[in-house]
Amino acid sequence: MKNFQWTTPCDYQTASVTGLTREHWEEVMVSLLEGILAYASPGKARIKLPGVNSTNGLVADELEGFSRSLIMAAPLLKSHPTLKLTVGNQTLDVVDFYHKGILAGTNPQHPEYWGQIGDFSQNIVECGSLAWSLYLSQAQIWDKYSDREKQQVADYLLQCNRVKGHANNWLLFKVIINTVLERLGMSFSKKEIFKNLEICKKMYLGEGWYRDGKTKQIDYYNAWGFHYYFLMWVILDGDRHPEIAQLHLQRMREYMHSFRYFFSGEGNVPCFGRSVTYRFAYLAPIALGLYLDGLEQDLGELKSICNRLLQFFLNGEVLTEDNLLTPGYLRHSPRLLEFYSCAASPYWLGKAFNLLLLPESHPFWQAEEKPLAIDRDSFSISIESAGYLLVGDRASGHVQLLNHKSHHSYPELSSKYTNFAYSSLFGYDIGPIRKKYDSDSSLCDNALTFSDGGRYVQRSQIQPLYCKPNFIASKYPLRMVKREATNWLPRIYTNLGWAWTYTLVKDDFMINVHYIKTRKSLKFKEGGYPLGFDEGVPEIISTEGAEVAYKDGKISFIRNLYGYDRQFPAQALISKDIENNIRYKSSVVPALGFENQNQKSFYLANMVYGKIGHETLDRLMQLVHNFQIADDLINLQFYDGEQVVMQLDKIKRLNLTLNGKTIEGKIAMARVSEDGKTCQIVQH
């Protein structure tokens, strides 16, 4: 595996941090295209990449390779209509390649036909990309087809209207397919366009964020699965429906108001949710927003976001020796992929190359790179609609995403959704999830896991309680699998009790307090951040009440503040023969444990600290003073004299004084600085 080797000279006059220009984006796209097109079939309709297969079938995987290569090529064809590439030892005419490939794939009589489209077929997804690409390359490809050939391609796309798809972001694929067909002068379904637009519009949660269907699944599909396709429709038909167009432009602007805080000093975002092998695909709606001149952010900041993110990933080992994208995140990691992913799936990052729709003369390319939000100041930004708390530390550039709302219906995806926190610096550990219902019971990084004697599981069915700056909380059932799923019967769950988790942020570390009610003896295990590394051995230190690990200038620390009765020194949770961390070859996780036995209700509390630095263990132990729980009231004091009170579950009326400040009312959390000048109160 290797990182990308740039050949275009850097220009630090306008890109003072990265040196990247539009030419660098073209260079990357051309290199990726030359790599993937080397695996094209003789008829040019399919691309079969070596490596993992999905559960969608071989034909769907090969169509995915074709369509996802085309979403990279199409934007560039607008500025390079006679684009030629070097594939192997031959010169390849890009327009001719896709012209022939589309005709072969949509021809039922051709051996490389993409097949009839059935219910919930992956072909629906890929036809959305195909339609948009046909629109972008209309002059080069579509307009060169005969009337009979146009009808053949249109007939294939129209199959999507006759089959069922998932009731989530998939609905937007049919919107784009039909709107493009209308723009190209072919038969289309107006009903499919506006019915699906309306359904997806109602998935809106607020502040620019959507849920993905009738679930609490909220993740980066907001970027590459919602806003991207809504803006696509605005470009295609927004001029005829200005009210709808303005609605989606405004929602995109609201989304960017918070999304700009996701980007770390490294240029990446906290890795979270499914399909993260798409890497920098969440730049796609930024590209279309710029194309529409519909964003409010400073162009220099947007340029920094795009360039730093591209540079971050390409400096990782994301390529094979023959320039294919690896399955994984920052390195080759097939176990990160979902069951619906194949070797071609990472090429959905090609959506980001819609930036190349902006000509060289566009102000975006001429703008000077500006500091990111994390470069300007530390922050704690709550996004209540999504249940996220974004915490950024300016000194280290570390950004953390705390989640107390989003979850996935599959327990095997828990590590991607239901950890208490996700980090731009510490990649989470991942179990094998290539098959449905597989999961690794030993993962506990940034998660309270529990077991009734079998596999450990994480929280699910999360009910958000509070989401405020530096304070976030949720309630969830202690839900175990009673019966595994079979071919004929669904999985059955049983609830063994309830847990309330309140997370308090101070600087860039966290206090997690859990109140648990259960009718059964359970084992609990909770870890800190996984300390990842590629070579060597971390320094691991245990002391009474705390575990810490140091490696490569980073710290992972967890301290027992209340209730835990056992400690686990930082150790690898999965065999070193299998890369289990999304960023590193190995990782270790310090952890705490507890077994409640006959206790039916109890508290657990810990401090979790993951950052760049090498603070001594003594210093780490002094960050929290005087943690106490009495009569269901939690009191603690931080190193700088700030005092905090919290109440979990049943909130009583309080009347007390913190650092000279009177606190009254039904209060979930109150904190007052030592001098009494800074106060935060969260009312119940």
Image (cartoon, rainbow, N blue to C red):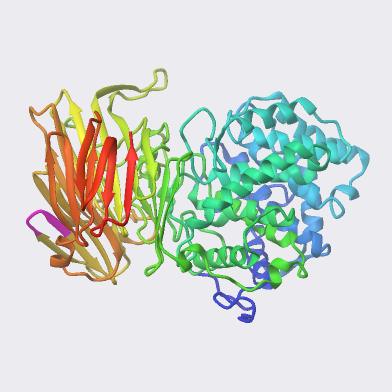
Q: Is residue 66 above or below residue 600?
A: below
Left or right of 423 on screen, residue 55? right
Which quadrant of the figure has residue 120? top right
At horizontal 82% and vertical 42% (from top left) the residue drawn is 239
Q: Is 545 in the magenta? A: yes
Q: Position of residue 564 (x, y in %)?
A: 12, 44
Q: Residue at x 78, y 39 (%)?
A: 242
Examine the structure image and report whether residue 139 is included in the region drawn in magenta: no
In the image, which residues are magenta? 543-547
Residue under the point 45% across and 60% down: 330
Q: Quadrant of residue 492?
A: top left
Give whichever of 382, 281 is nearer the camera. Answer: 382
Is residue 109 in sight in this rendering? Answer: no
Query: Is residue 402 among what the camera can see?
Result: yes
Identify the residue at the far right of this view. Answer: 147
Say whether residue 206 is left or right of residue 448.
right
- Where is residue 643 shown, x and y percent of the image? 21, 52
| Most frequent secondary structure within the magenta stretch | strand
Q: Is residue 57 above or below residue 4?
A: above
Q: Position of residue 164 (x, y in %)?
A: 64, 25
